[in-house]
Amino acid sequence: MLRSLLVSTLMLLCATIIESSILSNISFLLVVPDLVLICTIYFSLLNGKLMGETTGFISGLFLDFITGIPLGFNCLYRTIIAYICGLFSNTVIISGIIVPVLSVGLATIVKTVLINLIALFFPNTNVYVTGIISYEFLFEFIENIVLAPFIFRLLGAFNRYLSIKTTKDRVDNV
């Protein structure tokens, strides 16, 4: 489990750096896709609730430090989303296209709703809040669901290092 957590943390750190320094400087993107959320959902669906909420919290910490939003803002909603996704770890198969698109699409909707709810408790901060009916949300939603199968496939190449289940456990569950 420790190896999986360390590899997941390293991948989340890389996704955070790519998202905040490279993708945010591309001018034709109206909204930056949430690579960190997609990775966190993958880790949650692969390993379950505990690993999901842990990676959700860690990814939130990385984003809180980089964006300057009050500490805990990103941690809270990413932990909740990762926990919910981790509930389905034993019931879905994460290979293919449908599960990544559905899980990331629903998580993007839940993310927007949770950000709007949590922002009510941070009234004096500069938290960027968008509604579900906005161009920013629409573009982020489309970018996330288009990238989800590719990122899931990329992370699937590292399952040996990311999964806390042994090969025997994976065969028994199928």
Image (cartoon, rainbow, N blue to C red):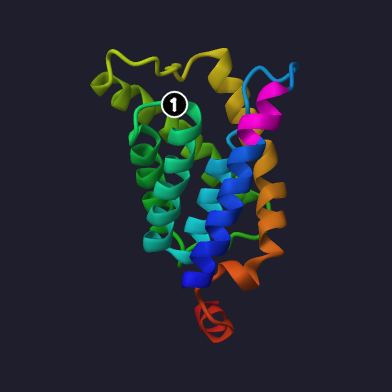
- Looking at the image, the residue that sits furthest to the left is 121
Could you tell me which residue is drawn at 24 percent across and 23 percent down? 121
Q: Position of residue 116 (x, y in %)?
A: 35, 22
Could you tell me which residue is drawn at 34 percent across and 33 percent down? 71
User: Of 15 and 101, which appears nearest the observer?
Assistant: 15
Could you tell me which residue is drawn at 75 percent across and 17 percent down? 28
Q: On screen, 45 above or below 39?
A: below
- Looking at the image, the residue that sits furthest to the bottom is 168
Q: Position of residue 131 (x, y in %)?
A: 44, 16
Q: Position of residue 152 (x, y in %)?
A: 65, 53
The overriding secondary structure of the stretch rendered in magenta is helix
User: Of 120 and 6, which appears nearest the observer?
Assistant: 6
Which residue is tagged 1? 68
- Asked whether 65 falls inside the magenta stretch, the response is no
Q: Which residues are magenta?
A: 19-25
**Amino acid type, residue under disc 1 in the picture:** Gly
- Asked whether 24 falls inside the magenta stretch, the response is yes
Q: Position of residue 174 (x, y in %)?
A: 55, 77
Residue 158 at least partly seen: yes
Could you tell me which residue is drawn at 67 percent across and 62 percent down? 156
Residue 99 at least partly seen: no
Neighbour tally class for label 1: few under 14, some 14-19, many 20 plus, Cα within 10 Å: few
Q: On screen, 47 above or below 54?
A: below
User: Of 132 and 66, which appears nearest the observer?
Assistant: 66
